[in-house]
Amino acid sequence: MLLLYQIYKRKSADGISLKTQIMYLIVFLTRYLDLFWNHAYLYNTIFKILYIATTMITVYLIAIKFKKTYRKELDRFPFQYLLLGAFILCFIFNSNHKKWFEYVYAFSLYVESVSIIPQLVLLVEQSEVSNLTSYYILFLGAYRGLYILNWIVRIITERHYKAWISWVCGIIQTVLYADFFYEFFKAKKMGKKMELPIPE
């Protein structure tokens, strides 16, 4: 919602990675395939549809409506290799080799764990990060951090140990955000606009 607000307010997709948004759309479309048969909780169904719909709208805004403001030359990370790696890994490591949906679910976890990479690379190329973009990425990282807290609570209260793939993917994703968090809080402490250091 924050990202959609940012794009509409500025009427610009500048600083946003279309590749990251496509990867998140792939994550939600694959992970939430169970919408066709799993209707246990209404709120859960509503949120799954909301994730898919808002991500589709975001992709549309970047790729079509505000295409002229999208900086394709900076969004050049070869994300197809991340998708290929996730596709290979889902056949090797998943929770149950006898159920087809476990392959799809594992694929969605692997893709999500690295989805932020094109966005971070774009921001490094651009150097300066807008306030709204930095908060959007901060909230994405916080979302992952809350997932890790959820897993810890489930281990303590339910003795739920089977989600090792989720743990590994969650830790990888959190590590990818670590440098961004450091730069974000450093900029806020100094009262400056956030800038990401360009690698030598």
Image: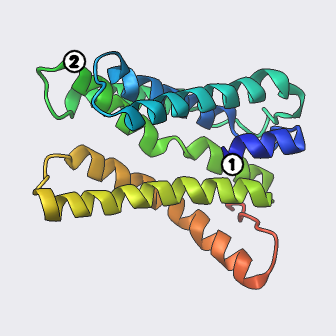
- Judge from the rendering whether residue 184 lies leftward or rightward of residue 38; answer left or right: right
**Residue 112 at x, y percent in the picture:** 44, 40
Q: Residue at the spot x=85%, y=29% of the render?
A: 66
**Residue 10 at x, y percent in the picture:** 88, 44
- Judge from the rendering whether residue 82 lies leftward or rightward of residue 190; answer left or right: left
Q: The residue tagged with tag 2: helix, strand or loop?
A: helix
Q: Residues within 10 Å of mark 1 (few under 14, many from 20)?
A: few
Q: Residue at the spot x=51%, y=65% of the render?
A: 178
Q: Residue at the spot x=14%, y=52% of the render?
A: 160
**Mark 2, residue position:** 100
Residue 187 appears anywhere in the view: yes
Amino acid on which the number 2 mark rests in the picture? Trp
Dividing the image into 4 quarters, which one contains the C terminus? bottom right
Question: Which of the two labelled residues, at mark 2 and mark 1, occupies the earlier sequence position?
Answer: 1
The relative height of residue 83 versus residue 146 in the rendered view (above or below) is above
**Residue 95 at x, y percent in the picture:** 17, 35
Q: Nearer the viewer, residue 137 or 175?
A: 137
Residue 129 appears anywhere in the view: no
- Judge from the rendering whether residue 197 lies leftward or rightward of residue 38; answer left or right: right
Question: Can you tell which of label 2 and label 1 is closer to the viewer?
Answer: 1
Q: Nearer the viewer, residue 165 or 38?
A: 38
Q: How is the image coloured?
A: rainbow
**Residue 89 at x, y percent in the picture:** 29, 32
Q: Residue at the spot x=37%, y=38% of the render?
A: 110
Amino acid on which the number 1 mark rests in the picture? Leu
- Residue 153, image quadrant: bottom left
Disc 2 from disc 1: Cα separation: 34 Å
Q: The residue tagged with tag 1: helix, strand or loop?
A: helix
**Mark 1, residue position:** 2
